Image (cartoon, rainbow, N blue to C red):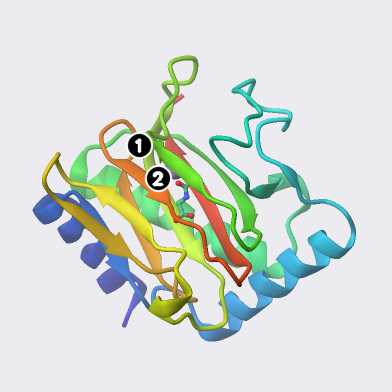
């Protein structure tokens, strides 16, 4: 699949069912490199509970979310982060030129949900932070079996909930202010990703 086809698949999903999924926008090597980065940051003690990060003041509340995060710092990206971020910049250009989205910023963090941790049903746009327009998650797990749990629930409406499992290399894309979603625990496995937002600031 070309990058363009991947972008189109994500956009088509967004238009047709309010979320897009693509399993091979990124090469296996890139996903591996990003996974190794995450493990290295974890080993170096750089993954911290979400909510005490430098950018947001939302509640540090382990009742709501239990992931450890590390922001990708655009000034000190390594080769894999550079490849990921430049793809996201091209995706922003694609969205701006095909969907009139007027995006002009982004932010991404690594996320690690240790076995049993979760993120309760939520929206990604906060009252204090309206700049997040689209959410984008890339899963970094080395394979994933549905029996391991850890699904992402997307609340389509009160009757219908759809599930996306965090298979390595899969990415998910939806509107930050509309799509309520929830990360379910994987009882016996660490669940890793890069999650981020395409913004208008
Ligand atoms: C988030 C989030 C979804 C996922 O980080 O805000 O909802 O599947 N992540 O990891
Ligand atoms: Mn979210």
Which numbered marker is on residue 176? Answer: 1
Residue 23 in the image: state x and y as whole percent.
Answer: 36, 76
Residue 84 appears in the rendering: yes
Q: Is mark 2 within 8 Å of ligand 2?
A: yes
Q: Residue at x 61, y 71 (%)?
A: 189
Q: Residue at x 62, y 45 (%)?
A: 66
Q: Which residue is mark 2?
A: 135
Q: Residue at x 16, y 59 (%)?
A: 12
The answer to whether 113 is drawn above or below residue 40 in the figure is above
The answer to whether 134 is drawn above or below residue 2 in the figure is above
Q: Residue at x 28, y 62 (%)?
A: 163
Label 2 secondary element: strand
Label 1 secondary element: loop
Decide which of 124, 201 is in the foreground and name it: 124
Residue 60 sits in quarter? top right
Residue 178 in the image: state x and y as whole percent.
Answer: 25, 34
Decide which of 135, 7 is in the foreground and name it: 135
Residue 147 in the image: state x and y as whole percent.
Answer: 42, 78
Marks 2 and 1 sit apart, C-alpha to C-alpha, by 5 Å
Q: Is mark 1 within 8 Å of ligand 2?
A: yes
- Labels 2 and 1 touching (C-beta < 8 A): yes
């Amino acid at each position: 699949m070309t990058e363009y086809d991947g972008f189109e698949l994500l956009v088509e999903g967004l238009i047709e069912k309010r979320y897009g999924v693509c399993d091979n926008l990124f090469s296996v090597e890139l996903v591996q490199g990003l996974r190794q980065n995450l493990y290295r940051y974890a080993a170096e003690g750089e993954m911290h509970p979400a909510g005490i990060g430098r950018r947001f003041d939302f509640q540090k509340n382990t009742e709501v979310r239990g992931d450890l995060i590390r922001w990708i710092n655009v000034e000190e990206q390594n080769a894999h982060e550079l490849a990921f971020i430049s793809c996201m910049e091209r995706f922003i250009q694609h969205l701006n030129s095909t969907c009139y989205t007027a995006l002009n910023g982004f932010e991404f963090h690594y996320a690690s949900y240790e076995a049993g941790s979760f993120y309760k049903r939520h929206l990604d746009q906060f009252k204090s932070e309206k700049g997040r327009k689209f959410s984008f998650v890339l899963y970094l797990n080395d394979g994933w079996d549905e029996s391991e749990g850890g699904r992402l629930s997307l609340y389509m409406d009160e009757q219908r909930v759809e599930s996306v499992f965090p298979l390595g290399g899969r990415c998910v894309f939806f509107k930050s202010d509309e799509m309520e979603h929830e990360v379910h625990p994987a009882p016996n496995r660490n669940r890793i990703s890069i999650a981020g937002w395409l913004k208008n600031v």
